[in-house]
Amino acid sequence: MEFQRQTNRRLYEEHAATVQLLARVERVFTGRAGAYPPLADDPEWRAFARALLSAIEVEVARHFEFEERDLFPRLEEAGDGDLAALLNEEHVTIRAVAQSLADLLRRAFAGGLQPQQWQAMKTLALEFSERLGSHAQKEDGALLPVLENLLDEDTDRELFGAYAAG
């Protein structure tokens, strides 16, 4: 997709990166690879788990907070409150799943997981993947096109600068 607004391009790029991570989640937690808990000291597992935990605690949290604080109110003012409400509801659901998944990831780092905990992590990871992937697609198809028309150049520059600065 080609967007004129910097804010939209940045969000779209983050969605693309998220989709790549979620593809990894699917590979790790399905099929033979996901049948048993990995060894606690497996370097590939630890790198993956760190990346997933970071995505949950930093990227997803930051992305959602930006949208809720800076974009959804603009949607509501422009008459697209239903879209803002729907996306916000999805944020709440995704955060709940993500928090439980993050808790299990931290436990895995602290000393490994028992088979039941591994099964719970698999379930949560696949639910997180499904919900967040669907959400990103929804934002690409609905939110970003609306913002493309809603944001003027100055507002876009201001929002992009604030988001990029963290």
Image: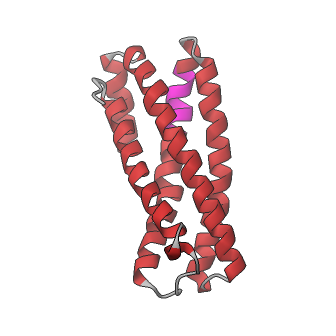
Q: Is residue 92 above or below residue 108?
A: above
Q: Nearer the viewer, residue 120 or 53?
A: 120
Q: Nearer the viewer, residue 127 or 5?
A: 127
Quadrant of the rendered structure where residue 147 is?
top left
* Count of labels in the image: 0
In the rendered structure, the answer to whether residue 37 lies left or right of residue 96 reads left
Quadrant of the rendered structure where residue 3 is?
top left
**Image quadrant occupied by the N terminus:** top left
Q: Residue furthest right?
A: 116
State the residue at coordinates (64%, 75%).
Answer: 118
Q: Is residue 68 magenta?
A: yes
**Image quadrant occupied by the C terminus:** top left
> Residue 62: percent from the left, percent from the top?
49, 46
> Residue 103: percent from the left, percent from the top?
65, 67
Q: Is residue 70 magenta?
A: yes
Q: Is residue 56 above or below residue 136?
A: below
Q: Residue furthest front?
A: 31
Q: Nearer the viewer, residue 161 or 56?
A: 56
Q: Is residue 132 above or below residue 82?
A: below
Q: Is residue 139 above or below residue 98?
A: above
> Residue 18: percent from the left, percent from the top?
43, 50
State the residue at coordinates (59%, 32%).
Answer: 87
Magenta residues? 65-74
**Most frequent secondary structure within the magenta stretch:** helix
State the residue at coordinates (48%, 32%).
Answer: 139
